[in-house]
Amino acid sequence: MTGRGLRVVEFQTVEYVSGPLLFLEGVHGVHYDETVEVVTPDGELRRGQVLEVDRGRAVIEVFAGTRGLDVASTRVRLGGDAARLGVGLGMLGRMFDGSGNAIDGGPPTLPESFWEVGGLAMNPAAREHPSEFIQTGVSAIDGLNTLVRGQKLPIFSGFGLPAAKLSAQIAANAQVAGAEEQSFVVVFAALGITHREASFFRRFIEDSGSLGRTVMFLNLADDPTIERLLTPRVALTAAEFLAFEKGHHVLVILTDMTNYCEALREVSTAREEIPGRRGYPGYMYTDLASLYERAGRIREHGGSITQLIILSMPDDDITHPIPDLTGYITEGQIVLSRELHRKGVEPPIDVLPSLSRLMNAGIGGDKTRSDHREVADQLYAFYAEGRDLRRLVAIVGEAALSETDRRALAFADDFEDRFIDQGNANRSIEETLDLAWDLLEPIADSELKRIHPETIAAYRGRKPATSPNS
């Protein structure tokens, strides 16, 4: 990351330091959001950014933290420009830290231009409605909660659930149907992860052969907390360049946004702001929206940005402020189930509370297959009925069930074992839909109430497609 300064003014008027923040007095000519250099007592340079300016007083967030700074000898150099990232096609296949500095041992990237990390304002009137199907290779998503190009879709996980593995699997296997392979790229941003998780992400993507189309930004758990506020903005800036300047279809994966919100709360506390729900700042909704709304398509631009946002729900509480506010901004949610995880189902996606609000725009005969909507509705109906019957069996026992109830109960088990549970397999949409028909095979035509007779006649009896990955 860099800031191209128009002037350099130095101040040595630090009033006090609080957490990751530094407070300056008696400053002039300071602008909100401009980049600064903090000179430590031993001469080390640390980058920072102006958060607030009020009557000669400035609040600065120091990306590398404030450890070792003192009030008397710390100096601050103001550069007069907003934080920028050097962007270029050379970023593909590379790994960067949360500030945009290369950390993979390779040479420095050669930037084609410098873009502000605050993002580009996307005119709502110029937005194109998302309509193209993105194949993730995961049946529970592609078949029942379809991701569409330009959509923002969160994955609600819980601590200990394999959200990291799912995100890496999607990053490795995702593709836009009908698009050339080189036109689809992945920008992967990990926030507050361990060294072990960072190694896992890198190894998984390398082994899949998709590293050359991936840009990785890693903010580790022992990196400065304040850097977590910068990481998603840097990643989205790279995505905007690749999408709207170079015409690529970009899938941005942000994990874990809970760590981002915790950093936001820490900064808010250091600024002594009045807390909102559960101590998070009242402006967290606006802050999250400033990130999530950077997804979409623009008319007369070939590229697009699609977001998969992964967050861990504290105490598995979907009403917690982080998932709650995220759900208001985004277009649906994918929910991971602790119960399915205990059963060994992988990935443990609970399709009943999951939803993709733009699914209908990305499926159908010219995008996926003509039977997609009807088959998805029928699978959902039978699985919901089977799940309800499980609760009934726990009370009255299986002996009290009718033959139809027993079939629904068996369907729910078969659906979890064969459709949701796929391990590392990369399934095409054809394989997913053919497998769905195979699950419906034991059920009489008269009971397929959500599928038209013409569709049943056209697809009933098809053998499920197979691939080496299935």
Image (cartoon, grey):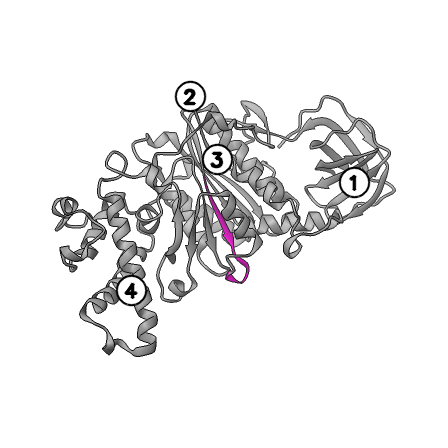
Number of residues whose C-alpha sits closer than 10 Å to that of mark 2, classed few (under 14), some (14–19) or many (20 or more): few
The image position of residue 158, as x and y in percent, is 49, 59
Q: Which of 227 and 373 is in front in this view?
A: 373
Residue at (32, 70) in percent of width and height: 390
How far apart are labels 4 and 2 at the CA level? Answer: 47 Å
User: Per the image, is 311 magenta?
Assistant: yes
Question: Upstream in the sequence, badge 3 or badge 1?
Answer: 1
How far apart are labels 2 and 3 at the CA level? Answer: 16 Å
Q: Name the residue under label 4.
A: 386
Q: What residue type is labelled 2?
A: Glu
Question: Upstream in the sequence, badge 2 or badge 3?
Answer: 3
Q: Which of marks 1 and 2 is in front?
A: 2
Q: Name the residue under label 3.
A: 295
What is the chief secondary structure element of the magenta stretch?
strand
Q: Which amino acid does label 1 sit on?
A: Thr
Q: Which amino acid does label 3 sit on?
A: Ala
Q: Nearer the viewer, mark 4 or mark 3?
A: 4
Question: Which element carries disc 2, helix, strand or loop?
Answer: loop
Q: Which of marks 3 and 1 is in front?
A: 3
Quarter of the image for residue 214 reads top left
Q: Residue 40 carries which label?
A: 1
Q: Can residue 468 be seen in this view?
A: no
How far apart are labels 4 and 3 at the CA level? Answer: 37 Å
Are the two marked residues, 3 and 1, in contact with CB atoms closer than 8 angstroms? no
Are the two marked residues, 1 and 4, in contact with CB atoms closer than 8 angstroms? no
Magenta residues span 307-316
